[in-house]
């Protein structure tokens, strides 16, 4: 009888301990998922610029949202200020070009022109003619779009002279095509304006006679 009583007590204690362990297990809080902070997530979300230098990200992949553009703009401005402060001018020149590309996505032509001009100043002094020519192409395109054809031709002429001086023959072909296109379109635009002026003058003369 004593044996059965002892066995019963041991079984009861074992079941109680097992129940307590199961209860503690179910009371555990589930593990929370890992959430990246803004700082951790930022590098993989910002896409800016088209430079081939390190520490830059491609502009053509930038998401078309105000939030993304604003973040990219802040990041580029901070990097440009840092590079200018510590006289890393070549990198700053590419930062300015990337900012211009960013503003072009928003049709902010005046700001894009300004930063391209800053980039060109550094590129000339550093003798970085590859970067200078690329900037001049974009500048000429901007100026032609906003009606500043003579200024666009001046940029292309500078690019032409630089390409000749440095023996960049492949660029000469591109530049000559761009110059010819702008000259042709400038002539067509001038002729259209003259025809319009003649038509207005003729209409005014006819009204005066009547």
Image (spheres, grey):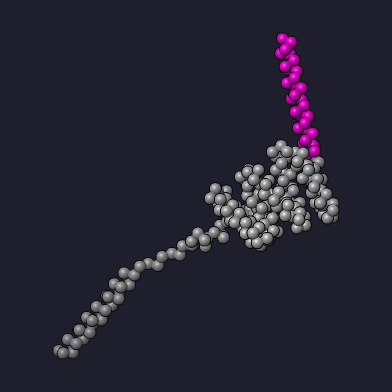
Residue 186 drawn at (x, y percent): 77, 35
Farthest left residue?
Answer: 1
User: What residue is shown at x 63% (from left), y 61% (from top)?
Assistant: 55
Farthest bottom residue?
Answer: 2
User: What residue is shown at x 73% (from left), y 52% (from top)?
Assistant: 121
Relative to 204, does residue 28 appear above or below in the rendering? below
Q: How many marks?
A: 0
Q: Which residue occupies the foreground of this view, 85 or 184?
A: 85
Residue 35 drawn at (x, y percent): 46, 62
Which residues are the magenta region?
Answer: 182-210
Q: Which residue occupies the foreground of this view, 95 or 20?
A: 95
- Is residue 167 visible to us here? yes
Relative to 152, does residue 4 appear above or below in the rendering? below
Q: Which residue occupies the foreground of this view, 73 or 121?
A: 121
Position of the N terminus, as image quadrant, is bottom left
Name the side, left or right, on which 35 lies relative to 85.
Answer: left
Position of the C terminus, as image quadrant, is top right
User: What residue is shown at x 61% (from left), y 54% (from top)?
Assistant: 77
User: What residue is shown at x 76% (from left), y 29% (from top)?
Assistant: 192
Q: Is residue 206 magenta?
A: yes
Q: Is residue 143 magenta?
A: no
Q: Which residue occupies the foreground of this view, 210 or 79?
A: 79
Name the side, left or right, on which 88 lies relative to 17.
Answer: right
Relative to 191, does residue 182 appear above or below in the rendering? below
Q: From the image, give the main secondary structure of the stretch colored magenta.
A: helix
Residue 20 drawn at (x, y percent): 27, 75
Residue 80 drawn at (x, y percent): 63, 56
Farthest top residue?
Answer: 210
- Is residue 63 visible to us here? no
């Amino acid at each position: 009888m004593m044996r059965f009583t002892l066995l019963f007590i041991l079984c009861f204690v074992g079941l109680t301990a097992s129940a307590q362990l199961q209860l503690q297990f179910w009371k555990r809080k589930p593990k929370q998922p890992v959430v990246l902070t803004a700082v951790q997530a930022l590098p993989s979300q910002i896409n800016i610029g088209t430079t081939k230098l390190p520490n830059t990200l491609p502009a053509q992949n930038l998401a078309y949202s105000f939030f993304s553009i604003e973040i990219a703009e802040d990041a580029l401005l901070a990097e440009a200020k840092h590079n200018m402060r510590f006289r890393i001018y070549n990198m700053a020149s590419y930062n300015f070009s990337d900012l211009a590309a960013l503003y072009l996505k928003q049709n902010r032509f005046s700001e894009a022109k300004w930063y391209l001009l800053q980039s060109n100043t550094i590129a000339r002094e550093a003798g970085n003619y590859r970067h200078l020519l690329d900037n001049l192409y974009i500048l000429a395109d901007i100026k032609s779009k906003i009606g500043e054809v003579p200024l666009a031709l001046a940029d292309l002429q500078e690019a032409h002279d630089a390409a000749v001086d440095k023996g960049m023959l492949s660029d000469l072909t591109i530049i000559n095509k761009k110059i010819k296109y702008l000259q042709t379109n400038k002539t067509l635009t001038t002729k259209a304006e003259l025809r319009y002026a003649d038509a207005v003058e003729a209409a005014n003369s006819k009204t005066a006679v009547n």
